[in-house]
Amino acid sequence: MALLAAIPVALLLWLVWKQPRLRIAGSLEAVNSGAARRLIETPGLKVDGIYITEIIELGDDLLVGYRRDPDTSPIDETSGDRHGGALPLDPEEGQMLLPRIVRDQHGMLFVQRWYADHTPLASLTSVDRKLFGLLDRRGGMALVVELSVPT
């Protein structure tokens, strides 16, 4: 009888301590090499409170309009370069280009869901400006793309 009483308690403890697995979509090279997880853990630039306002397909690329909630925390500038290529000069609203994401079924699903649900996101840029990501911590989803930066 005591064993039956312990099962619901054990189940509740397991649900509380179980860490949700982060699902990452986007560039296969970045995801497979572990670079995507490193971007999420230690971004060079992080901007919280991003909301997707529009989605425009441009061939294999996606142009995503966004606005930033002014009541969110300030921009986290770990790299010291505020305009590291991920956001335009006005970080409150603008567009982001997500290269080669249209062919990624999971990435497109994430973006469309975030747009439809008005999900608050964090935008992340790597210190070397080669990776860009959108992170939904509450939903456990992230999208990471490789940026083509002219040299």
Image (cartoon, rainbow, N blue to C red):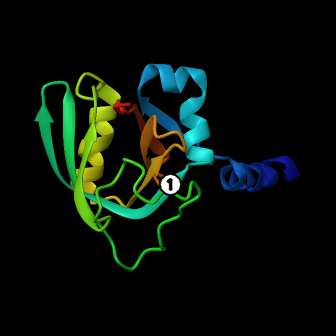
Q: Residue furthest bottom?
A: 71
Residue 65 locus on image (x, y percent): 20, 53
> Crowding at label 1, few (<14), some or many (≥20) Cα neighbours within 10 Å?
many
Residue 138 locus on image (x, y percent): 48, 56
Residue at label 1?
45
State whether residue 121 is above or below residue 147: below
State whether residue 79 is above or below residue 103: below
Most foreground residue, 13 or 122: 122
Most foreground residue, 13 or 17: 17
Give left or right: position of 88 versus 63.
right
Residue shown at 43%/74% (left/top)? 72
Q: Quadrant of residue 105?
A: top left
Q: Amino acid at mark 1?
A: Leu
Residue shown at 30%/24% (left/top)? 104
Residue 126 locus on image (x, y percent): 52, 43
Q: Is residue 106 visible?
A: yes
Q: Quadrant of residue 26?
A: top left
Most foreground residue, 23 or 77: 77
Give left or right: position of 59 versus 116.
left
Residue 12 locus on image (x, y percent): 69, 55
Q: Quadrant of residue 37?
A: top right
Residue shown at 29%/68% (left/top)? 92
Quadrant of the snapshot with the C terminus: top left
Most foreground residue, 45 or 70: 45
